[in-house]
Amino acid sequence: MLSASAGRILSIVMRALILVTLGMIASSCGSAGSSDDIPAGSQSSVAPTGTPEPQTLELSVTDAMFSTDVLEADAGRPIIVAFSNEDSIVHNFQLWRDDSREEKLFFGELLDGPGTIEYEIGALEPGTYRFECHPHVATMFGHLIVAEPEP
């Protein structure tokens, strides 16, 4: 059996634990920063977080040739390659770290032509990358130049 003073101490400690627990629950359930705080039709002054808006690069193939041998993109923004195969043979888009072709970064699905597809590459760091068509690497290649965006 507990003495009267030990019982009071235990009671105080239990109350403190309950208050701390309730405070933690209340703070985690609060609505600060939720979309419910923004009236309909208003815009939040808080800057959006997450992935930057993607950039779309257009690349087509006609007569077994790419429409360009140089693509340019901003670093840090996801890249989508809108690929159009105008030929009646299969082509694709693949991406290497550089001309050494030692590190493949992306291999796009082979596309029977004519047809279109969007390849989601993702964000890249600044640099010069090699792109090519897998079935035609000797004749269909170019460079993707990724640079820091201008302010």
Image (cartoon, helix red, strand yellow):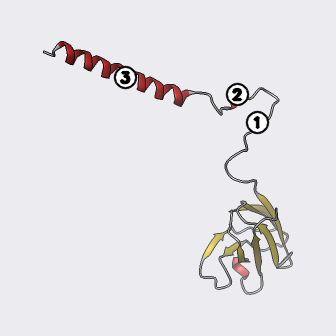
- Residue drawn 16% across the image and 15% down it: 3
Report the side of 110 relative to 71 (left or right).
left
Residue type marked 1? Ser
Q: Residues within 10 Å of mark 1 (few under 14, many from 20)?
A: few
**Residue 34 in view, yes or no:** yes
Q: Which residue lies under the disc numbered 1?
A: 44
Check the picture and name the quadrant holding the N terminus.
top left
Check the picture and name the quadrant holding the C terminus.
bottom right
Q: Is residue 28 above or below residue 126?
A: above
Tell me the mark number nearer the camera, choosing from 2 and 3: 3
Looking at the image, which residue sits at the far left? 1
The mark that comes first in sequence, 2 or 3, is: 3
Q: Which residue lies under the disc numbered 2?
A: 37
The mark that comes first in sequence, 1 or 3, is: 3
Q: Which residue lies under the disc numbered 3?
A: 16
Residue type marked 3? Ala
Give the spatial CA distance, label 2 vs label 3. 31 Å
The x and y percentages for residue 62 are: 86, 75
**Residue 90 in view, yes or no:** no
Q: Residues within 10 Å of mark 3 (few under 14, many from 20)?
A: few
Asked which quadrant contains residue 110, the reply is: bottom right
Q: Could you say whether the residue bearing mark 2 is in a helix, strand or loop?
A: helix
Q: Nearer the viewer, residue 125 or 101?
A: 125
